[in-house]
Amino acid sequence: MLLLNQKNLGEEALNKIARLALKSQIRKAQDLQVRVKTDPNLLAQGKLESLLIDGTGLVMGQNLRMEEMRLQMKTIAVSPFKALMGNIELTQPTDGTACIRLTEADFNRAFNTKLLSDRIQALPTEQNQHPITLTPQSIHCHLLATGKIAIDVDLTVSTGECQQVTMEATPTMLGEEVILADCHYSQGVEPCPKFTEILRQKALDVLNLRDFEIQGISLYIEELTIESGQLTVCAIAKMTHFPRKA
């Protein structure tokens, strides 16, 4: 009975530490489950049996949102003495798995930011050899059943003209990176090459989950699937240090 109580107390304390650390890096969550599994014997050997992070509707630090995230690590090597004092410190990196799902609405949220709008407006652009400014009025991303991503942009030109352009591309894996193949405009004409590069780079940041990583945990994508309205990513998760309170 005493051993059971010690086990529960150890897991409860570690779960509380892990949950507080993760919550400090996540602005909002519809649901967040954090589960550290261990027992006194394992902890004395410097081992945690597993760590599970399971969340829905997670809003990250830059107001980026994930519909779902499930991350699991097994056989985590830690400093036993520090863990008993409430400080979970890894003694070696640990690999695990992650599955993340983003919706079309999550993509739109990532693209409709003041920073992206300001970058487009700051582009050195000309029309008929006269400098002009492009102001995005709206950006809509579409995740298509064909496996493509389409980005619709409504632009206002400083001359008073309105433009509508749609950039399409096919995300595909190249090693551990997602690249955009067959990038082209299916509607309108390219305002300028740097405009295309801004959209392209933002899409790659989202697709490669660069802005969605948790401190101490890096993601290496193995598989990416786009269906109508959603993106699912399966990745290797490498933890170099336990998430800390921000």
Image: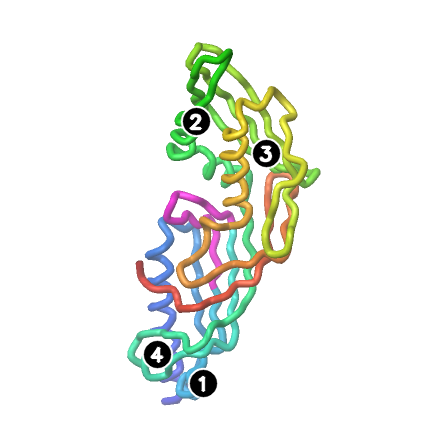
Reading the image, the residue beneath label 2 is 123
Tell me where the magenta segment starts and ends, as one range.
53-67
The residues tagged by marks 4 and 1 sit, at their Cα atoms, a distance apart of 11 Å
Residue 169 in percent (x, y) is at 64, 36
Element class at badge 3: strand
Tell me what residue is drawn at x 33 percent, y 68 percent: 17
Disc 4 vs disc 2: which is toward the camera? 2
109 to the left or right of 178: left
Mark 4 residue crowding within 10 angstroms, few (<14) / some (14–19) / many (20+)? many
Earlier sequence position, callout 2 versus callout 3: 2
- Residue 214 in the image: above or below residue 93: above
Closer to the N terminus: mark 4 or mark 2?
4
Who's the residue at 45% across and 49% down the image? 211
- Point out the frontmost of discs 1 and 3: 3
Task: Give the distance between the C-alpha atoms of the residues marked 1 and 2, in whole angstroms.
Answer: 57 Å
Category of crowding for the residue at label 2, using alpha-carbon neighbours closer than 10 angstroms: few (below 14), some (14–19), many (at least 20): some
Looking at the image, is mark 3 or mark 4 earlier in the sequence? 4
What's the residue at 50%, 29% (across, down)?
Answer: 195
**Residue 83: mark:** 4
Q: Amino acid at mark 4?
A: Ala
Q: Position of residue 133 (x, y in %)?
A: 42, 19
Q: In the figure, is residue 61 to the left or right of 154?
A: left
Q: CA distance from mark 2 to mark 3?
A: 25 Å
Q: Nearer the viewer, residue 209 or 3?
A: 209
Please give the residue where the numbered disc 3 appears in the rendered image.
Answer: 142
Query: Magenta stretch containing residue 1, yes or no?
Result: no
How far apart are labels 3 and 4 at the CA level?
Answer: 46 Å
Residue drawn at x 53%, y 40% as measured from the top left: 203
Q: Which residue is mark 1?
A: 42
